[in-house]
Image: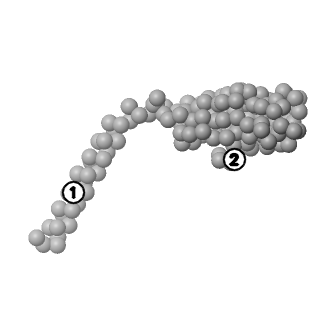
Amino acid sequence: MSVRRGAAVLMCVAMVLAALGAARGAERTPAETRPSQAVTIEITAKRFAFLPATVEVVEGDQVTLAVTSGDGTHGIEIKTLKVKKEVPRGGTVVTLSFTAPAPGTYEINCSEYCGRGHNDMKAALVVSPRGQ
Ligand SMILES: [Cu+2]
């Protein structure tokens, strides 16, 4: 086999593999994905908890947390996602927006010292896989 011919054969193999890959990708789309959604979840921060304590979203969703304080100043932070906002006293709504990351559980914590229970003031962001 000449070098040239060998190259042509390799090219054909590559093209067939690429076509197979594309076909497989197309098959997978309807079963495993649904369109991402914009979701807004209201959260109240109050000494020393967040309500709800579990926030459930789906991977890839455009999530907005609308947070208000039920008493003094708090903060809301999801360290893994590098998002953080202060939540002032007086009921002002603070929004925190992000794209829901890979499935798993992420800790939400209070980022402003608010008293004795501050270190225990946590909630969970639970991200489930798409298409379920
Ligand atoms: Cu706090």
Q: Residue furthest bottom?
A: 3
- Seen from the viewer's position, the closer of residues 80 and 9 is 80
Relative horizontal placement of residue 117, taking residue 4 as reference (left or right): right
* Viewer-side label of 2, 1: 2
Residue 89 % position (x, y)? 88, 32
- Count of number-bearing discs: 2
- Mark 1 CB lies closer than 8 A to ligand 1: no
Could you say whether the residue bearing mark 2 is in a helix, strand or loop?
Answer: helix
User: Label 1 amino acid?
Assistant: Val
| Gap in angstroms between the C-alphas marked 2 and 1 | 46 Å
Horizontal side of residue 59 vs 91, given as left or right: left
Q: Which mark is residue 116?
A: none
Q: Residue at x 10, y 70 (%)?
A: 1
Q: Report the residue at 53% width, 34% height from top.
A: 128
**Category of crowding for the residue at label 1, using alpha-carbon neighbours closer than 10 angstroms: few (below 14), some (14–19), many (at least 20):** few
Colour scheme employed for the rendering of this structure: one colour
Q: Which residue is mark 2?
A: 79
> Residue at coordinates 38% horizontally, 35% vertically from top-left?
29
Query: SS class of the residue under badge 1?
Result: helix
> Which residue is rendered at x = 21% and y = 57% of the image?
13
The percent coordinates of residue 119 (x first, y second) are 79, 42
Lower position in the chain sequence, tag 2 or tag 1: 1
Reading the image, the residue beneath label 1 is 13
Frontmost residue, 52 versus 130: 52
* Amino acid under disc 2: Lys
